Image (spheres, rainbow, N blue to C red):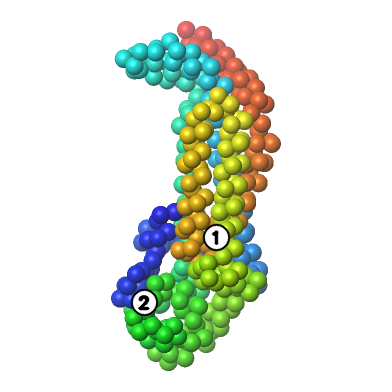
Amino acid sequence: MNSILLFSSSASTAVSEGIAIFKPLYWVFGKCMGFLLELLGNQYFVAIVIFTVVTRLLLLPLNVKQQKTMARTTRLQPKIQKIQNKYPDPKDRAKMNQEIQDLYSREGHNPMQMGCGPMLFQLVFLMGIIGIIYYPLVYVLGMSAVNDNSQAILDTILPIYRDIIGDADAKITYFQLNILENFDAYKDALVTSFPDIFTAEKCEAITQYREGMNLFGIDMTAFPHWKDGIIIIFPILCLVTSLASSVVSTIIQKKNNPAAGQQMASMMAMMLMMPFFSFYISFKVPAAVGFYWIISNLVAILQQIFIFKQYPPRKTQARLMVENTIERRSREENVKKIK
């Protein structure tokens, strides 16, 4: 989540347009969001929920594969411990590792398949969501000319913004979000200075989009703050749902691999750090990003429970044992035929 902070622009002379490598992703997500908004009658947050659920469904095969890999690793744990006990001397570490690798080879097991694939996929998806939240004029409403004229537009709205907040030195950090948030105040100046960009049709689209960014009367383009009332519920829910997801994940991993209890204890501290980090970050991003995290955490909890119920450790290990036996016998038969 550190990369989220890269989207900010701290000076009024530099307009952030996002991370270049992710711009194709912004475009794809923007097109999808535009389609969903049209389909759902501008129900912005329903579209975010659909995005999140679809993403988790796409991740389901990877998560199931992780579950099976974890079960296979658990089944091999007694054999691995036997090899480790065989080589207590640190000087024999190379021999021990080689025997463990030979065991994996015989069993047709690759522990690296547990990997970080789902996490990386979620990070990429998060970048796409951040992109359409931070840069909606360009990527959702199709106003690409805003990027081409960003500095001139900024110079036009900055004096108005400073008058609004009563600070002659104020700087606009999130350019397109700022336009959305203060569009009523900026509209006349923007239409006068940039008639080809802010046409009547685009102004209407911005107004409708702006209305869709309100959830239960809360402006979701705003950044949560302790002094701003009910909007503080989003960082709190980010923390609660993230903690719940971490706890559920820990419980399931312990049941999957009871032998890893000590290792899990050391990992628990790291797992608890992430929810509090997301709580901190949720004050640095628009409330709409926090909403996405909340939905993502809730869906993740349901997905973890579903996978655990569908692929319980003991049944999965038994099934894998049968599959491995069949596979081993098949390899042995093929070797005999070759001989």
Q: Position of residue 313 (x, y in %)?
A: 64, 28
- Residue under the point 30% across and 76% down: 13
Residue hosting label 1 = 235
Give SS at disc 2: loop
Horizontal arrangement in the rendering, residue 323 relative to residue 160 (left or right) = right
Horizontal arrangement in the rendering, residue 167 relative to residue 280 (left or right) = left
Q: Say above or below: 33 vs 277.
A: below
- Mark 1–mark 2 Cα distance, whole angstroms, equals 25 Å
Q: Position of residue 174 (x, y in %)?
A: 42, 71
Evaluate whether residue 54 shows in this view.
Answer: no
The residue at the far front in this view is: 227
Q: Say above or below: 95 vs 256.
A: above
Residue hosting label 2 = 171
Give SS at disc 1: helix
Q: Position of residue 137 (x, y in %)?
A: 47, 74
Q: Quadrant of the N terminus?
A: bottom left
Q: Pointer 1: residues within 10 angstroms few (<14), some, or many (20+)?
A: many
Q: Quadrant of residue 246?
A: top right
- Residue 81 — which label? none
- Identify which amino acid the numbered label 2 is placed on: Lys
Tally of numbered tags? 2
Q: Which one is earlier in the sequence, the residue at label 1 or at label 2?
A: 2
Q: Pointer 2: residues within 10 angstroms few (<14), some, or many (20+)?
A: some
Q: Position of residue 68 (x, y in %)?
A: 58, 31
Evaluate whether residue 233 shows in this view.
Answer: yes
- Identify which amino acid the numbered label 1 is placed on: Pro
- Residue under the point 50% across and 42% down: 271
